[in-house]
Amino acid sequence: MAIDVNNESGTEIDERAVLDVARYALARMRIHPLSELSVIVVDADAMEQLHIQWMDLPGPTDVMSFPMDELRPPAKDDEEPPQGLLGDIVLCPEVAKKQGEEAPTGHSMDEELQLLTVHGVLHLLGYDHEEPDERAEMFGLQAAIVDGWRAERGMTGPSPAPTTR
């Protein structure tokens, strides 16, 4: 899996964890190992500009996803996944820090960025959370992926609760 993490935010983040959780999520979703993903980390001003430009919504947001080849997980276990460009995930550590602090269980900015990375991957794969049934499916899958990743790394304690909108 070719994954690039480009931190343009000026905030120090755990880039290795973002890379690892993205790779884990894509493998778990059975995305072709030669597919490509870009993760860009930006400051609140840059995220606000993207949020206004693409969603016509004010203020910075936590994560945005920009799909390219609209890849989807294979429908059947024996189906060969297609290879391609997944697209871009844009993360904002300033928003992630605030959301982590405000979460019911409270967690770090890096834990929130890991959660948001998985959230962004799922959006690139066509998942959404506008309707209650979509929300349940996406957030359930997001929790399972984050929990599986954390368990493989021997991380203890509760996983971050979903805080993204």
Image: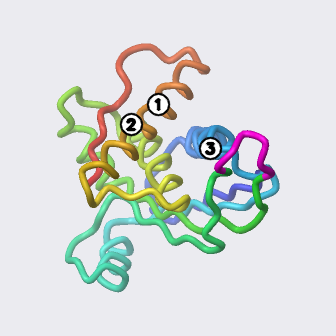
Q: Position of residue 154 (x, y in %)?
A: 56, 14
Residue 144, label in figure = 1
Q: Amino acid at mark 2?
A: Gly
CB of mark 1 within 8 Å of CB of mark 2?
Answer: yes
Q: Position of residue 110 (x, y in %)?
A: 43, 39
Provide the residue designation for mark 2.
140
CB of mark 3 within 8 Å of CB of mark 2?
Answer: no
Q: Position of residue 143 (x, y in %)?
A: 41, 33
Mark 3 Cα-neighbour bin, 10 Å: few <14, some 14–19, many ≥20: some
Q: Is residue 92 or residue 66 the one in the foreground?
A: 66
Q: Amino acid at mark 1?
A: Ala
Indicate left or right for 147 with 71 as reference.
left
Q: How is the image coloured?
A: rainbow
Magenta-span inclusion, residue 79: yes
**In the displayed structure, would residue 144 be above or below residue 78?**
above
Instruction: Give the overall secondary structure of the magenta segment.
Output: loop
Alpha carbon of mark 3 to alpha carbon of mark 1: how far? Answer: 11 Å
For marks 3 and 1, the one nearer the N-term is 3
Q: Amino acid at mark 3?
A: Met
Tell me which residue sits at (27%, 44%) in the image: 163
State which quarter of the image contains the C terminus.
bottom left
Which residues are the magenta region?
75-80
Magenta-span inclusion, residue 111: no
Tell me which residue sits at (29%, 64%) in the image: 61
Q: Is residue 86 or residue 97 the one in the foreground?
A: 86
Provide the residue designation for mark 3.
29
